[in-house]
């Protein structure tokens, strides 16, 4: 498939670390579900990215299957979209080496996610963490996608992928399509329940900071009860009240009500009244996802078959682009 093909494609992925949370769902996965009907879609469990921070091997193995199952449970239809595991398609790692040799160090030194994670990890920073965005660029560019649906935090990485693609095309001739980020404003940045100024994240050490898609009703009740709030009476979408803004936004997206209706409903109310209602909305929203998750994982071999099939389909597309890249670079074809 060349960059000029008329097939509209989308590609995205999430790391199998911990389990997916409401931020992942609202910022990314729910958009994938929407996109799959309009695009030829590739959704990847990016296990090689997870290795950039120390992982327990058994947990990584379990989290890879869990993440794939959660894609399906969230509404990704494996008959429409290709669901696969990154490390099952060797082209991702090979292409990363090739693109590494074109990417200036200082492009990577500017990456905010690297800088933030490096500070947290101290001495544990490895080259993979630094190189993370080039692996991500490979993931994307190999599939020639038109759009890449992600949360706000990934915008800079997408710009880098475009820069790498542009540089390759300039030097070696038109090869990669420059993908557009697809960042839906609503839900693009769901914040931690413990701090309305930092994003909800799988790697936050406090589980109270996030609502996981597989949390029980009791977990959810407890987390929302203990969520940080302010002392102002009356709930509003006021960016100066980050915790209030975040909880109302979650309520708004999950309930489907308009911001105006929500503000008027909660104008004279405090968090004590609001929190049980939010709990109910979240619990009800997650129920069908959790039921579907149990179904997907109950049938032995079902998920494995989806991933096996996905890797074959993904491998064909990625292999074609990689072959083209190798040829453009002047690498001798295998004899
Ligand atoms: P980690 O904390 O381990 O880096 P993460 O929670 O950021 O993980 P990823 O697997 O890196 O999750 O992200 C998967 C997708 O979810 C990406 O498209 C990312 O932009 C999106 N995403 C992650 N966190 C949020 C959030 N808080 N709000 C909206 N979107 C998010
Ligand atoms: N870095 C992304 C995960 C990711 C991704 C991708 C997203 C890896 N490769 C390709 C979109 C397209 C993150 O969410 N942390």
Image (tube, grey):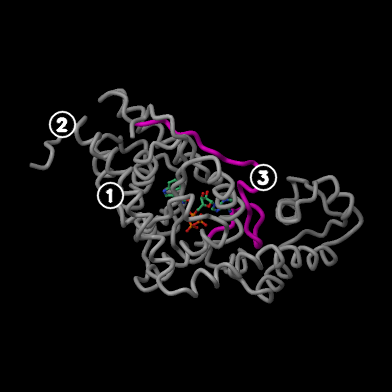
Real-space CA distance between mark 1 and mark 3, rounded to the nearest whole angstrom = 33 Å
Q: Quadrant of the C terminus?
A: top left
Report crowding for label 1: few under 14, some 14 to 19, many 20 or more residues within 10 A (C-alpha).
some
Above or below residue 284? Residue 103 is above
User: Residue 164's spot in the image, x, y percent?
Assistant: 35, 33
Give the label on residue 93, or none: 1
Residue situated in front as seen by the camera: 280 or 308: 308
User: As drawn, is 209 to the left or to the right of 246?
Assistant: left
Span colored in magenta: 176-201
What SS does tag 3 mark?
loop
Give the label on residue 186, or none: 3
Real-space CA distance between mark 3 and mark 2, rounded to the nearest whole angstrom = 45 Å
Report crowding for label 3: few under 14, some 14 to 19, many 20 or more residues within 10 A (C-alpha).
some
Residue situated in front as seen by the camera: 248 or 68: 68
- Who comes first in sequence, dot 1 or dot 3? 1
What SS does tag 1 mark?
helix
Callouts 1 and 3 close, C-beta under 8 Å: no
Going by the picture, which residue comes out furthest to the front? 79
Residue drawn at the location 62% of the way across and 68% of the way down: 208
User: As drawn, is 275 to the left or to the right of 149?
Assistant: right
Real-space CA distance between mark 2 and mark 1, rounded to the nearest whole angstrom = 19 Å
Above or below residue 101? Residue 196 is below
Give the label on residue 264, or none: none
Residue beneath disc 2: 330
- Who comes first in sequence, dot 2 or dot 1? 1
Residue drawn at the location 86% of the way across and 48% of the way down: 261
- Mark 2 CB lies closer than 8 A to ligand 2: no
């Amino acid at each position: 498939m060349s960059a000029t093909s008329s097939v509209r494609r989308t590609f995205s992925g999430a790391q199998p670390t911990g389990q997916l949370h409401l931020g992942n769902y609202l910022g990314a996965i729910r958009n994938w579900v929407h996109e799959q009907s309009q695009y030829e879609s590739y959704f990847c469990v990016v296990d090689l990215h997870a290795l950039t921070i120390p992982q327990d091997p058994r947990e990584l193995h379990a989290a890879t299957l869990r993440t794939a199952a959660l894609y399906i449970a969230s509404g990704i239809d494996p008959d429409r979209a290709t669901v696969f595991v990154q490390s099952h398609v060797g082209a991702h790692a090979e292409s990363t080496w090739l693109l590494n040799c074109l990417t200036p160090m200082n492009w990577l030194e500017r990456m905010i996610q690297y800088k933030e994670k490096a500070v947290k990890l101290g001495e544990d920073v490895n080259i993979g963490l630094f190189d993370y965005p080039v692996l991500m660029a490979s993931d994307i560019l190999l599939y020639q996608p038109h759009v890449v649906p992600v949360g706000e935090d990934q915008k800079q990485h997408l710009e880098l992928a475009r820069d790498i693609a542009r540089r390759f095309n300039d030097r070696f001739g038109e090869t990669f399509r420059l993908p557009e980020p697809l960042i839906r404003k609503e839900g693009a940045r769901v914040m931690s329940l413990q701090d309305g100024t930092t994003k909800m994240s799988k790697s936050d050490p406090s589980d109270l900071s996030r609502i996981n898609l597989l949390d029980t009703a009791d977990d959810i009740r407890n987390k929302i009860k203990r969520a940080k709030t302010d002392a102002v009476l009356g709930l509003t979408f006021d960016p100066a009240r980050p915790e209030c803004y975040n909880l109302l936004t979650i309520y708004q997206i999950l309930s489907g009500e308009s911001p105006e209706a929500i503000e008027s409903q909660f104008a004279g109310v405090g968090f004590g009244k609001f929190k049980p209602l939010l709990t109910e909305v979240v619990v009800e929203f997650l129920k069908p996802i959790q039921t579907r998750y149990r179904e997907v994982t109950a049938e032995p071999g079902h998920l494995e078959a989806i991933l096996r099939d996905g890797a074959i389909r993904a491998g064909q597309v990625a292999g074609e682009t990689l072959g083209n890249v190798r040829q453009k670079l002047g690498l001798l074809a295998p004899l």
